[in-house]
Amino acid sequence: MSGIRKLAGQTAIYGLSSIVGRMLNYLLVPIYTRIFSPVEYGVVSELYSYSAFLLILFTYGMETAFFNFIHKEKENKNVYATCLSAVVISTVVLTSVMIFFSGQFASLIKYPDKGEYIIWLALIIAFDAITSIPFARLRQQNKAVKFALIKIINIFLNIGFNLFFLIGCPLWIKGDYGVLSQLAVSLYTPSIGVGYVFISNVLASGVTVLLLFRQYRYFTFQVDKALLRNMITYALPLMIAGFAGMINETLDRAIYKFIAPNPATALRELGIYSACYKLSIIMTLFIQTFRYAAEPFFFAQHKQDNKRSVYALVMTYFVITCSVIFLVVMLYLDIIQLFIGEKFRSGIGVVPILLMANMCLGIFYNLSMWYKLTEQTHYGAYFAVFGGVLTVILLFVLIPIFGYMGAAWATFITYFAMMLLSYFTGQKYYPIPYKVKDDFITVILALLCYAIAYYVQSLFHYQGVLLWVINSLFLCGYLFAIYKINLPDMQLRQAKTKTTPSNTYRKTE
């Protein structure tokens, strides 16, 4: 339990940068959805979906490889230098290609004469790539506070630059604000429009590189060729898995305008879908924060005799937390939806589907740690490729018929299938005593609670404060039920994690 408490503590600290920081960044969504039209917001969403794929190419799994080899080869002092050197060199090459052929790439994705979009994306990805290994080192050294502080500074800078370009400059140009007006005239070009979203990101990411100066200070280009070969062998399946996983996460937005039922309104629909997607971001933020802390925790816990009982206990806590997040978002959706502009709210129906999809994804991440712990990373590639292929099939079948609702259902079906595949495969090669029945009941009760609350509200049509009070009672009832159902078993399992004999599960290892 001391290990789980440490995991919880580090999750809270990483949450300072992920949840609190991203929530601050999340405040840009109501600004974007009130300044930009759905078409313009669709452009932002589409281009950032491309950047997600490119970042995987730029880092090619070396972050996780660093975690593995820094534990595996403690006597080798070249792990960090080799990893960072490889990423920096490859980043310089790939960024140069993107900038040199920016015009051609822009035309390829149907943004002719917008080569600057590609240049801005290249710089954003380059800065993020060369900081990924220093950030990983901070996590490995348990410097969660420093990690969180730099991440939050990056987010504040990004917000600040956005506010400066999107709100401040247009206001100052129209009025007489002295120096501010002169500054706005010299720096702001109205025709750039949504481009200032990317420019703000470039500036914030560039400053982040400077903030990580100490991580580069004693760094010299030094490549241990044998070590690098082993790291790449370990990392390449993760890169393939990353690409396939990103297909699951962002391909719907990357290809939507190419296969939408009505091409004339595709970007508008994409903007609406992307904005409503943000309403499920609370679940995504928790999962991301958990992964920051869980990955190094699971690697460290792997040496303990009671590790499998701990992994099962972590899963139960994780499922409960995700179920509560789902219920909170859905019961107070009438408030949460105010974060996006009114013209974007027609797509609100995707929110429960995407929340459940992200819950399945989070469970999949928990289930799939076994292949990283046992260095059978090729299974990660198998799972991700399976999910990627299924996603592509479902997107091309469902989007032309149902539009963005089809994209949401494709996401859920894919993550649900991947979750099941990972569970059954993992139990075959690395059995963990998960409480599947209890965890399943936890999720089903959340769905039933929301369904009943929705039915009662539609039956009596209550609104405002009364709606919040009644929904709060439903939430409290759910929390009490989960407490009563899970508490005895969780107490027993906590006790077992302290007393598990050292030879438990030894035959299967």
Image (tube, rainbow, N blue to C red):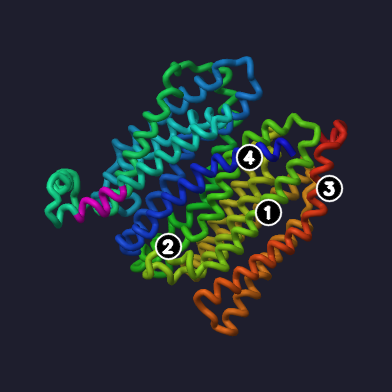
In the picture, the disc for residue 71 is: none
Segment colored magenta: 162-171
- Tell me the residue that label 1 is attached to: 319
Q: Do the residues labelled 2 and 1 touch (CB within 8 Å)?
A: no
Would you identify the image quadrant in which residue 123 lies? top left
- Give the residue number, with chain letter if any, for mark 3: 492
Q: Earlier in the sequence, mark 1 or mark 3?
A: 1
Marks 4 and 1, Cα distance to the nearest angstrom? Answer: 14 Å
Residue ID for mark 2: 339
Residue ID at (77%, 40%): 308
Point out residue 302 in the picture as x, y percentages from the top left corner.
73, 32
* Residue at image coords 72%, 63%: 480
Decide: few, some or many residues near mark 1? Use Cα within 10 Å; few <14, some 14-19, many ≥20.
many
Q: Nearer the viewer, mark 2 or mark 1?
A: 2
The stretch drawn in magenta includes residue 463: no
Residue drawn where x is 19% and y is 48% of the image: 188
